[in-house]
Image: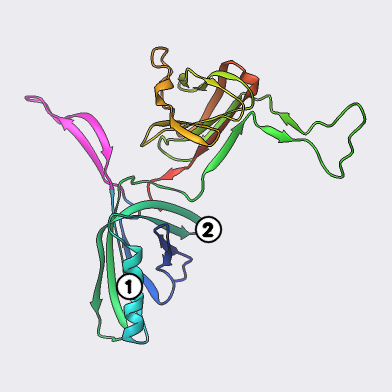
Amino acid sequence: MVTDRKIIIGNGKSSLELTCEPYTVENIRGFDRLTVQNVTSQGFDQDGASLLNSYVLPRDMEISGQIRAESTVQMQTLRDKMFHIFTPKTDVTITHYYGGVNRVITARVQKSPKFEFTDVLAVQNYSVELKAPDPYWRDETETLVKIADIKGSFHFPLAIPKGKGVRFGIKSSSLIANIFNRSGIKVGMKFMFVANGEVTNPQLFHINTRKYFRLLCHMEAGEKITVETGQENTVTRNRNGVTEDYIGKIDLAGGGDSFLQLEPGDNLLRYAADDGESMLETRIYFQNKYTGV
């Protein structure tokens, strides 16, 4: 059967395509189905059970296939390449391409590559097992949505009218953006407050859920504050190239402590500030997530 499937493994230092000769993939396991653990309780004389919670467990994955070589020296070289890619205690990124769609997932080696001899001397079978703590596949690249950014407004050749000057950029007046989450689940995001002047107490409000995130702080021109939500909730400030933890600036007493996530479908987000709102830009980064490939 003709297929355009590609499986590429990378560890940050090097990468290896397992669907390209001299490597082949014969079977994959755990690329599609998720395992869900439903926690229930049952009272005395109760029919059925009461559902307390549901958890998606880490994803167990296995890749098996063959290696073809012209000599034992070449075979050992190809085996070593796999050992160097599937290194214990190291994150590996699995990129899966099929039907024109790229999706990626991060995993760790559960069982390092195993090799078996075959009846054909030039061929060896291999298998490797992995575990993905975050079980969801995601887009290969982040989606960026800018709210109230600076749009360029000049072109060349440039002529500067005497006494009038030239406008080099126009700040968008929009305070609201619609973020569409194609996932069937809630996903975390990264949003960044960027100050073009003095700003006091920036916040991001989720219009659909009526929840918001607010910081009690003063920002100066050039300062950036990045908030990450989802698996890990973090707040960091970057000022003059120096990064520091800023989680202590969250408005806990005022209720602005919701680490906002994107609901499936449309998400209307509005940024605001107590003072200097016109000097504030907001950038939102996210990746759609998928239950399988």
Above or below, 162 against 102 in this view is above
x, y (%) of residue 199?
58, 20
Q: Is residue 243 left or right of residue 33?
A: right
Q: Residues within 10 Å of mark 2 (few under 14, many from 20)?
A: few
**Which one is in front, 198 or 240?**
240
Residue 263 can be seen in this image: no
Instruction: Say which amino acid is labelled 1.
Output: Asp
x, y (%) of residue 136?
37, 46
Instruction: Say which amino acid is labelled 2.
Output: Gly
Label for residue 67? none
| Label 2: element kind | loop
Q: Earlier in the sequence, mark 2 or mark 1?
A: 1
x, y (%) of residue 76?
31, 79
| Label 1: element kind | helix
Q: How many marks?
A: 2
For the residues marked 2 and 1, what is the alpha-carbon distance in whole angstroms?
31 Å
Q: Quadrant of residue 87?
A: bottom left
Q: Is residue 172 left or right of residue 101?
A: right
Q: Residues within 10 Å of mark 1 (few under 14, many from 20)?
A: few
Residue lying farthest left? Answer: 44
Image quarter of the N terminus: bottom left
In magenta, the rendered stretch is: 34-58
Look at mark 1 in the image and give the residue it sits on: 80
> Which residue is located at x 41 percent, y 23 percent?
258
**Which one is in front, 195 or 242?**
242
Look at mark 2 in the image and give the residue it sits on: 100
Residue lying farthest right? Answer: 162
